Image (tube, helix red, strand yellow):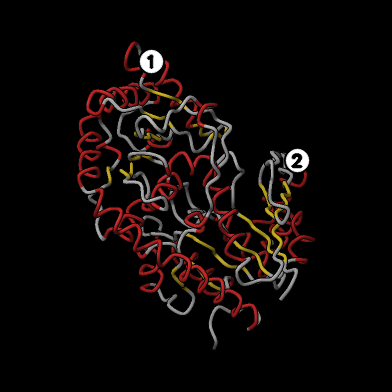
């Protein structure tokens, strides 16, 4: 195959560095198997990312205005004529979809209940399947759906009928799909972000002195507050401030506050900056809040220089794991549990939302620093298998395309 075009769907803008890392990692992987792959990233956002890769273009989709004639027709047809509803909802991508050899659904956790029932992605998959365009879930976490049993049946039927193959990034999703009758469709692969290459940053610009003492990094997400019983954002800012103070007191190392998502509806930088502004005196002198304009690859490079990282965002932890940096995961999602189990065989280096308090964070950082040698050994072992596993996944996808977009050989 040559000059193959792949449509990327389900992803956010580069304001989410994890979304950027998935795109860049995917492009790098596909170049190992396809001669001249091109990628069209369909965005449910008017924001156009700054793009440095000539093989990646971004195509923003226009939002259908609530209450408009198209919106009314779309929702009416949801009940009476679903195929027409799907055409009204996704018709903007028809031309690009028909030019593509395959569609990769790359949003990572779109096929979970983390952000509500993902009916939108089922409708999108059905629309593409109706157009005879092969659809692959790529680098995904899937499920569990036990909290919505009726929806679970709909989802498993969709994956069996409309999706060519499912490539999952951790064992929990793999075992879950196998146990629900999808053994012939599911493949293991690393998250594509593991292979994104870091880009060095002029540390003087952001005020870091890596040579003097490797810093401890901290990433927190506004999403964490949703999973902490009775905690509102103002209280979570206070908690974050106290965590920073506890880290400074315990180790007296520089603390680097690392935003990984800076979108308007979920902005790590706003949260971290508010906590930073609450500091005073010596504590504030030991803390640097990174700007909100670093790319995913630049952020990964800074993370690679850390003594250790405490992070909520999944792809911030992946940047650390792939750089052999000891990491405490602040886990509000099944993704964190799955990744820690995959890498270490346990979840000892993880804190659930209700445990995110200063004393517990300090305790876990002490543990990962104590276990640094063992952690780095596990990470080096895993990274040694990343490229073979990833290349195997790309080859399996290519083979499926050669079979006409079927995920099995029946």
Category of crowding for the residue at label 1, using alpha-carbon neighbours closer than 10 angstroms: few (below 14), some (14–19), many (at least 20): few
Give residue 244's mark: none
| Residue at 80% across, 61% down | 95
Image quarter of the C terminus: bottom right
Give residue 68's mark: 2
Query: How far apart are the alpha carbons under marks 2 and 1?
Result: 45 Å
- Residue indicated by mark 1: 278
Q: Nearer the viewer, residue 201 or 90?
A: 201
Vertical placement of 62 versus 213: above or below? below
| Residue at 37% across, 67% down | 176
Left or right placement of residue 338 versus residue 222 in this view: left
Q: Secondary structure at mark 1?
A: loop
| Residue at 20% across, 44% down | 370
Vertical placement of 248 versus 6: above or below? above
Residue 226 % position (x, y): 39, 35
| Residue at 65% across, 82% down | 402
Category of crowding for the residue at label 2, using alpha-carbon neighbours closer than 10 angstroms: few (below 14), some (14–19), many (at least 20): few
Residue 290 % position (x, y): 49, 28
Q: Nearer the viewer, residue 187 or 214?
A: 214
Of the residues tagged 2 and 1, which is closer to the observer?
Answer: 1
Quick one: which residue is furthest to the right in this view? 95
Quick one: which residue is furthest to the front in this view? 211
Left or right placement of residue 182 versus residue 131 in this view: left
Q: Secondary structure at mark 2?
A: loop
Vertical placement of 199 versus 6: above or below? above
Quick one: which residue is furthest to the bottom in this view? 410
First of labels 2, 1 by sequence position: 2
Image quarter of the N terminus: bottom right
């Amino acid at each position: 195959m040559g000059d193959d075009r792949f449509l990327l769907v389900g992803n956010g803008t580069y304001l989410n560095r994890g979304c950027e890392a998935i795109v860049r990692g995917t492009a790098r992987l596909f170049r190992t198997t396809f001669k001249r792959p091109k990628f069209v990233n369909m965005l449910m956002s008017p924001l156009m990312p700054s793009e440095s890769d000539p093989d990646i273009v971004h195509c923003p989709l226009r939002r259908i205005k609530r209450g408009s004639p198209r919106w009314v027709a779309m929702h009416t047809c949801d009940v009476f004529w679903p195929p027409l509803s799907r055409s009204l909802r996704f018709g903007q991508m028809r031309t690009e979809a028909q030019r593509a050899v395959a569609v990769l659904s790359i949003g990572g956790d779109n096929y979970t209940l983390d952000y509500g029932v993902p009916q939108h992605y089922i409708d999108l998959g059905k629309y593409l399947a109706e157009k005879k365009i092969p659809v692959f879930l790529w680098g995904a976490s899937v499920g569990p759906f036990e909290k919505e049993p009726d929806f679970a049946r709909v989802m498993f039927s969709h994956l069996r009928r409309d999706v060519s193959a499912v490539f999952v990034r951790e064992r929990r999703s793999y075992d879950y799909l196998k146990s629900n009758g999808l053994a012939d469709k599911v493949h293991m692969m690393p998250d594509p972000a593991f292979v994104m290459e870091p880009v060095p940053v002029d540390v003087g610009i952001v005020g870091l002195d890596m040579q003097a003492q490797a810093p401890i990094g901290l990433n927190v997400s506004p999403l964490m507050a949703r999973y902490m019983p009775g905690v509102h954002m103002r209280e979570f800012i206070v908690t974050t401030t106290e965590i920073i103070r506890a880290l400074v007191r315990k180790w007296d190392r520089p603390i680097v506050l690392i935003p990984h998502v800076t979108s308007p509806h979920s902005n790590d930088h706003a949260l971290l900056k508010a906590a930073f502004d609450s500091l005073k005196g010596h504590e504030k002198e030991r803390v640097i809040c990174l700007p909100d304009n670093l790319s995913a690859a630049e952020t990964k490079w800074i993370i690679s220089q850390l003594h250790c990282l405490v992070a909520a965002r999944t792809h911030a932890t992946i940047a650390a794991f792939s750089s052999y940096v000891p990491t405490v995961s602040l886990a509000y999602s099944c993704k964190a549990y799955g990744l820690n189990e995959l890498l270490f065989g346990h979840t000892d280096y993880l804190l659930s939302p209700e445990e995110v308090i200063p004393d517990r964070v300090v305790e876990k950082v002490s543990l990962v620093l104590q276990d640094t040698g063992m952690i780095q050994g596990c990470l080096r072992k895993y990274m040694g298998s990343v490229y073979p596993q990833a290349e195997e996944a790309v080859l399996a996808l290519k083979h499926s395309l050669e079979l006409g977009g079927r995920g099995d050989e029946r």
